[in-house]
Amino acid sequence: MQPLTDTDSHILQSIRSGDTAALEALYVQAIPIVTREMGGQRRAHKWLQDALIRLRTDVRNGRLKREPNENLVEYLARRVRERWEQYQQEKELDARIIECLQSETDNGWAFYYMQRYYFPSISYYIRSNGGTEEDAKDIIMDSIYALLYNIREGKYVAQDTTKLKTYFYSICKNKWKDYAKKRKNNMIVSLLDGFEPEDDDAHYYVAYEDDVLNERQKVVAEVFQQATERCHRILSYFYYDNLSHTEIAEKMGYQNADTSKEQKKRCMGKLRLALLKRLGGNPDMDE
């Protein structure tokens, strides 16, 4: 590797000391090059800023790696060029996926690609937000069909500023939020069933707006969190994971589905008694 010039050595020393003026000087030198290579693309500015941040991090951590005979401005231009090439490849891939989904007979490759390469991130998001691997499989398939519909109906048009993957992830996240909200709301409605609210309080039965629980629903959530581990598991399996009583019996080690039903009934009874102490009313203890 070519030894650093006096100028580069001075800049690196300034970066190590936290002098932002050195980064600004590099930006001024590199921006005409990257802008010209990218045909005046506005994202050249952002990508150059990203490259400067990476340069600062690498310098401070002693991890800066340059190509042979490469000065700092050339290093920055190369990093932006690599980012540009990656962007172009992603756009070509997006175009191929869209073309396949538009086809009535040849969209198998797009389904396969999205399930294989998009699934890990979607699965991680859903499992990190109370879902399961099976939930993730259902959500990604529903989202692929939603994307297919949006493309064929002209509701999605490819844009330079947004990657297809980003758009698809937003569909998956919105579908999961709706799905999780319905599950939680089903349990809340079941637990509140039988309580007699005041007339001006009747909306508490079904109100659930923008992930913000009203006061009565907050009490339900607190009571549920205080349930025994066994009850917490049974009710979570039933309301959150949407499992049948046969499946719950297998997971809990019960003999049959009838035992699962009886245990769920007892758990709901205990929670309703706890709600009775907190909220008052006259709940029906039989389901």
Image (cartoon, rainbow, N blue to C red):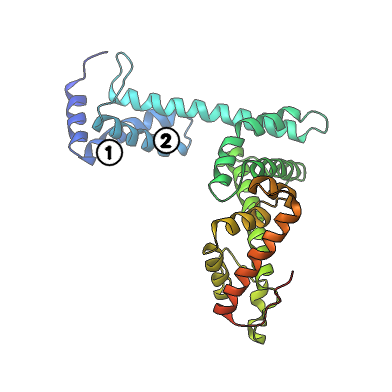
Q: Amino acid at mark 2?
A: Trp
Which tag, 2 or 1, sits closer to the chain's start? 1
Which residue corresponds to the image point at 73% horizontal and 52% vertical from the top-left? 245
Name which quarter of the figure residue 275 lies in: bottom right
How far across and down, in percent of the image, does residue 107 sit? 76, 31
- The residue most toward the right is 105
Lateral position of residue 61 relative to residue 95, left or right: left
Please identify the quadrant where the N terminus is shown: top left
Of 145 and 123, the residue lying toward us: 123
Q: CA distance from mark 2 to mark 1?
A: 14 Å
Residue 155 higher or lower than 43, as above or below: below
Q: Amino acid at mark 1?
A: Glu
Of 255 and 252, the residue lying toward us: 255
Please identify the quadrant where the C terminus is shown: bottom right
Residue 107 higher or lower than 150, as above or below: above
Between circles 2 and 1, the one closer to the viewer is 2
Name which quarter of the figure residue 47 lies in: top left
Residue tagged 2: 47
Residue 220 higher or lower than 53, as above or below: below
Residue 37 in sight: no
Residue 120 in sight: yes
How far across and down, in percent of the image, does residue 284 sit? 71, 76
- Asked which secondary structure carries label 1, the reply is helix
- The residue most toward the front is 255
How far across and down, in percent of the image, does residue 283 sit? 68, 78
Which residue corresponds to the image point at 70% horizontal and 74% vertical from the top-left? 285
Of 270 and 63, the residue lying toward us: 270
Residue tagged 1: 24
Which residue corresponds to the image point at 70% horizontal and 55% vertical from the top-left? 260
How far across and down, in percent of the image, does residue 7 sit? 19, 25
